[in-house]
Image (tube, rainbow, N blue to C red):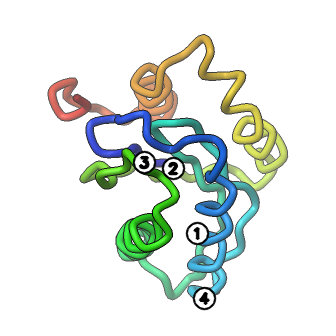
């Protein structure tokens, strides 16, 4: 999961599907299997099986760089100025896959009651990952 730069609410709903299809293509080219992709105006979630020969950091870098170029070339999000510097990548038991797919599908509804920042902190805590609040802003 990663956010837009400064958590700008620039990923308008009308063109998110184009972005998701583009990212799916990037994943396929890297021999990764996409289970689900979704998000809201300020961030996206990608549930994927990463090919063993692919480094997660390089995959995210490729997704961010190429999708930024795609967004700008296609002019699909007028207010988009880029992605945040970091990202969150978490591993889950394969048996959790169906629940995660549903969670990602329900992002619009979910974020009516929880902000991205609160969601991100909750997931970090669930995974026992220590963090410094100043790096989350």
Q: Is residue 39 above or below residue 16?
A: above
Q: Which circle's residue, 1 or 3, is located before the other in the chain? A: 3
Of mark 3 and mark 4, the one earlier in the sequence is 3
Please tell me whether mark 3 sits on a helix, a strand or a loop.
strand
Callout 1 touching callout 3 (CB < 8 Å): no
Q: Secondary structure at mark 1?
A: helix
Q: Report the Cα–Cα distance between label 1 and label 3.
A: 13 Å
- Name the element at disc 2: loop
Residue 41, image x and y in percent? 51, 36
Q: Give yes or no for contact between labels 2 and 3 (Cβ–Cβ under 8 Å).
A: no
Q: Give the image location of residue 28, x and y in percent.
A: 66, 82
Name the residue located 48 percent from the left edge and 82 percent from the top edge: 54
- Whether residue 88 is visible here, answered yes or no, is no
CA distance for labels 2 and 3: 12 Å
- Circle 4/circle 1 CB separation < 8 Å: no
Comes first in the chain, label 4 or label 2: 4
> Is the Cβ of the residue at disc 3 closer than 8 Å to that at disc 4?
no
Helix, strand or loop at label 4? It is helix
- Mark whose residue sits in front, 1 or 3: 1
Q: For marks 1 and 2, give the CA distance.
A: 18 Å
What residue is shown with label 4?
Answer: 29
Which of 133 and 42 lies nearest the eye of the viewer?
42
Of the two numbered discs 4 and 2 in the rendering, the one whose residue sits closer to the viewer: 4
Residue sitting nearer the eye, 71 or 116: 71
Mark 3 vs mark 4, CA separation in Å: 20 Å
Quarter the C terminus occupies = top left
Judging by the rendered image, the residue that carries numbered circle 1 is 23
Residue 87 position, x and y percent, is: 37, 51
């Amino acid at each position: 999961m990663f956010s837009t730069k400064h958590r700008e609410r620039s990923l308008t709903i009308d063109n998110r599907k184009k972005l998701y299809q583009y990212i799916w293509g990037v994943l396929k080219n890297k021999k990764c299997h996409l289970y689900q992709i979704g998000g809201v105006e300020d961030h996206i979630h990608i549930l994927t099986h990463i090919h063993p020969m692919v480094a997660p950091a390089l995959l995210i870098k490729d997704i961010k760089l190429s999708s930024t170029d795609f967004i700008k070339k296609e002019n699909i999000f007028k207010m988009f100025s880029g992605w945040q510097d970091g990202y969150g990548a978490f591993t889950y038991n394969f048996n959790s896959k169906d629940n995660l797919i549903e969670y990602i599908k329900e992002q619009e509804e979910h974020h009516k009651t929880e902000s991205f920042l609160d969601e991100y902190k909750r997931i970090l805590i669930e995974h026992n990952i220590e963090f410094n609040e100043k790096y989350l802003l």
